[in-house]
């Protein structure tokens, strides 16, 4: 039968042993002992690539994190790991460093690819920081508006992270239910690369706005998987759509429809216009504006020293030239429309009608795609949104009215409920809000708020997202490093390890052969009393008559102690009176001379000779004749004190 079916019998050797004893009294037992390799072939620790019995090559970049007690040790750890990093699979290396090391306050991270691990540990490839005394336990989100889009802005993440591709596909399905549906696919536009069609239409309102919102939704959901959720969200212009989704005010399908309908309304009903970024505050720029707001008006209050003007093409061009001659910074914003101006009045009504119609296509399942409720500060009103839903006509107001981004961020800076927020993440295709946000923080003395972008134009978007996770790690935010790299494991090996399930093959192993922690021994932590130091390492050797200097006294006290015994100084017996040994007078002179000499050496005094005048020996002590050293009658305890005395007294008293 095997031959007919072209089958082969299994030739794998059995890895089990069996025993089947039969008891005399009828008690039977059967035991099967099976090799652990047969059940869990992945149980072992990770091994170098040259001897590993598994293949953990990873096609996408991974985040590697290191830490230490101090900066010097951190770089020693980096050097130690980098010396052997190329010997291991980067997946095993990331798993071990991120999940099986204690994380200290001095931290660094790098982004590594398979077969390029050594380059990842170069100094210029690592980003380093110290967790602040107040770690970033709460973060806020800033949302970029239209204009930050660029060709290929999400092409790497869509390939590297199947989760993100799934989100984009679901958003595409929502748009395809509209009447009429868009003429493009979001995924195709985001991965367009150098495609001419993608490059030519990516700035069109009905394309750019849903693309930016789709990117923001994907990043929000990805961050949620990493354990990152906003305490407060603020959006700039159309970025409020993404902010509303992050705050749980609308669902993801509602957000993508609102963005697409906004772009469609602008494309169908608006007239040509122009916008101009100016390096002046709202009060300063007012003197240059015409009285007729229909010609030019302030469209966005970006910061205390930055506004965006909106109006007729000719007026914007004339005003830009005038401000340039005055040395004022200006930059054209290539929107092709005069957003947030009276030009948008007719568009707002069309937008309301289109949006109301298309929202009816949503299903009950669509409404479940929603983030938990959190705070959002409106850049339409410049205040906190306290209701559970957005007011009627909010999105048309967002299109027509001035963007009060400066006021909205001020609320985050000053409101007590947002004091725990110390890190603001910009969610969008580019770091467009970096300058305005930092200017607002500077003006409001909100140094606690730090800024981190999610994507940067013309940089690899996958690596930028990993850098965002790394920045959260440096700031002390409890980002899930396991989940950060889990998306990469899923892409390479099909599925990530499920907690509690050992039946699924592991996609990363623990490396037990990595270098140990590189301790820093430069700082001495041994605290020793001065008395112990002086006793352990005296400045002078013991003198037969003077003894040793008494340790632990003040610098002004100069006292020596000695125990005189015949067994230590046998020649003392030679100086006797009536058979009793008497301490010789010359001994006092010798002790005084030695004491002064030791004082000279310790204090650095310029003493070249010792002269003794008017030496009074008050008592000639008799030395005990015993030699056991066990009682007070067999030795003589001699204390020598050298002092500077008053005049008219003997120079030395012993």
Image (cartoon, rainbow, N blue to C red):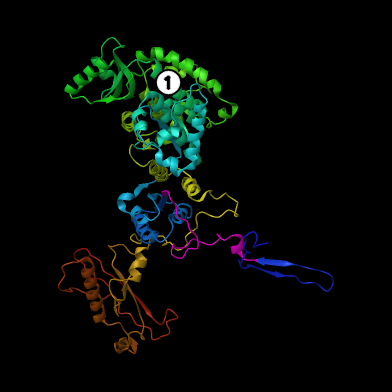
Give how far across and how far down residue 651 sits, in percent: 20, 69
Magenta span includes 48: yes
Residue positioned 55% across, 23% down in the render: 361
Residue named by callout 1: 264
Give how far across and how far down residue 84 sits, in percent: 38, 61
Q: What stretch is highlighted in magenta?
A: 34-62
Give how far across and how far down residue 317 sits, in percent: 23, 19
Q: Does residue 15 lie above or below 476 as drawn?
A: below
Q: Is residue 524 left or right of residue 14?
A: left
Give the quarter of the image for residue 575.
bottom left
Give the quarter of the image for residue 588.
bottom left
- Given residues 147 and 585, the one toward you in this image is 147
Residue positioned 56% across, 28% down in the render: 366
Residue positioned 43% across, 59% down in the render: 88
- Given residues 418 and 577, the one toward you in this image is 418
Q: Does residue 539 lie above or below 415 as drawn?
A: below
Q: Please, what secondary structure does the residue beneath circle 1 have?
A: helix
Q: Residue furthest right?
A: 25
């Amino acid at each position: 039968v095997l031959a007919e079916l072209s089958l082969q019998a299994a030739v794998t050797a059995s890895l089990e042993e069996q025993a089947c004893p039969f008891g005399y009294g009828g008690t039977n037992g059967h035991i099967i002992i099976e090799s652990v390799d047969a059940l869990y072939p992945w149980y072992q620790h990770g091994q170098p690539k040259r001897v590993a019995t598994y293949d953990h090559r990873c096609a996408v970049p991974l985040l590697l994190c290191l830490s230490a007690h101090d900066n010097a040790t951190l770089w020693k750890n980096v050097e130690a790991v980098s010396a052997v990093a190329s010997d291991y699979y980067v997946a095993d290396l990331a798993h071990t460093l991120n999940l099986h090391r204690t994380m200290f306050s001095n931290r660094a991270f790098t982004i590594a690819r398979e077969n390029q691990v050594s380059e990842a540990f170069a100094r210029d490839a690592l980003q380093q920081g110290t967790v602040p005394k107040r770690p970033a336990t709460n973060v806020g989100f800033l949302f970029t508006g239209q204009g930050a889009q660029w060709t290929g802005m999400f092409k790497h993440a869509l390939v590297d992270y199947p989760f993100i591709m799934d989100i984009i596909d679901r958003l595409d399905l929502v748009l395809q239910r509209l009447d009429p549906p868009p003429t493009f696919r979001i995924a195709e536009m985001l991965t367009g690369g150098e495609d001419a069609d993608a490059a030519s239409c990516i700035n069109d309102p009905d394309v750019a706005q849903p693309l930016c919102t789709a990117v923001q939704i994907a990043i929000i959901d990805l961050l949620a998987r990493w354990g990152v959720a906003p305490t407060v969200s603020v959006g700039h212009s159309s970025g409020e759509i993404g902010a509303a989704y992050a705050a749980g005010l609308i669902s993801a399908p509602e957000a993508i429809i609102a963005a697409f309908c906004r772009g469609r309304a602008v494309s169908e009903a608006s007239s040509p216009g122009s916008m101009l970024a100016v390096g002046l505050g709202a009060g300063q720029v007012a003197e240059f504006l015409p009285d007729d707001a229909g010609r030019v008006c302030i469209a966005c209050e970006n910061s205390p020293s930055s506004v965006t003007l909106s109006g007729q093409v000719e007026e914007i061009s004339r005003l830009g030239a005038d401000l340039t001659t005055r040395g004022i910074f200006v930059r054209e914003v290539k929107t092709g429309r005069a957003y947030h101006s009276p030009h948008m009045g007719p568009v707002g009504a069309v937008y309301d009608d289109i949006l109301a119609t298309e929202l009816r296509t949503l299903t009950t399942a669509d409404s479940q795609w929603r983030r938990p409720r959190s705070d959002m500060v409106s850049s339409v009103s410049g205040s906190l949104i306290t209701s559970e839903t957005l007011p009627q006509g909010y999105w048309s107001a967002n299109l027509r009215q001035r963007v009060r981004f400066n006021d909205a961020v001020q609320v985050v800076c000053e409101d007590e409920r947002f004091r725990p927020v110390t890190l603001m993440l910009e969610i969008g295709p580019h770091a467009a809000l970096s300058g305005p946000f930092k200017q607002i923080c500077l003006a409001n003395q909100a140094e606690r708020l730090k800024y981190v972008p999610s994507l940067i134009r013309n940089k690899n978007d996958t690596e930028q997202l990993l850098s965002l996770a790394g920045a959260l790690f440096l700031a002390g935010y409890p980002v899930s490093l396991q989940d950060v790299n889990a998306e990469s494991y899923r892409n390479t090996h099909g599925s990530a390890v499920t907690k509690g399930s050992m039946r699924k093959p592991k996609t990363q192993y623990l490396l037990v052969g990595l270098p140990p922690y590189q301790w820093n021994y430069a700082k001495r932590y041994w605290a020793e009393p001065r008395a112990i130091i002086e006793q352990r390492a005296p400045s002078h050797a013991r003198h037969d008559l003077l003894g040793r200097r008494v340790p632990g006294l003040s610098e002004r006290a100069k006292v020596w102690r000695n125990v005189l015994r015949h067994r230590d100084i046998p020649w003392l017996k030679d100086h006797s009176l009536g058979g009793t040994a008497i301490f010789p007078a010359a001994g006092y002179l010798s002790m005084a001379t030695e004491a002064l000499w030791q004082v000279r050496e310790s204090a650095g005094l310029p003493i070249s000779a010792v002269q003794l005048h008017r030496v009074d020996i008050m008592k000639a002590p008799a030395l005990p004749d015993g030699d056991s050293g066990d009682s007070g009658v067999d030795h003589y305890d001699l204390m020598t004190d050298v002092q500077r005395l008053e005049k008219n007294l003997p120079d030395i008293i012993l």
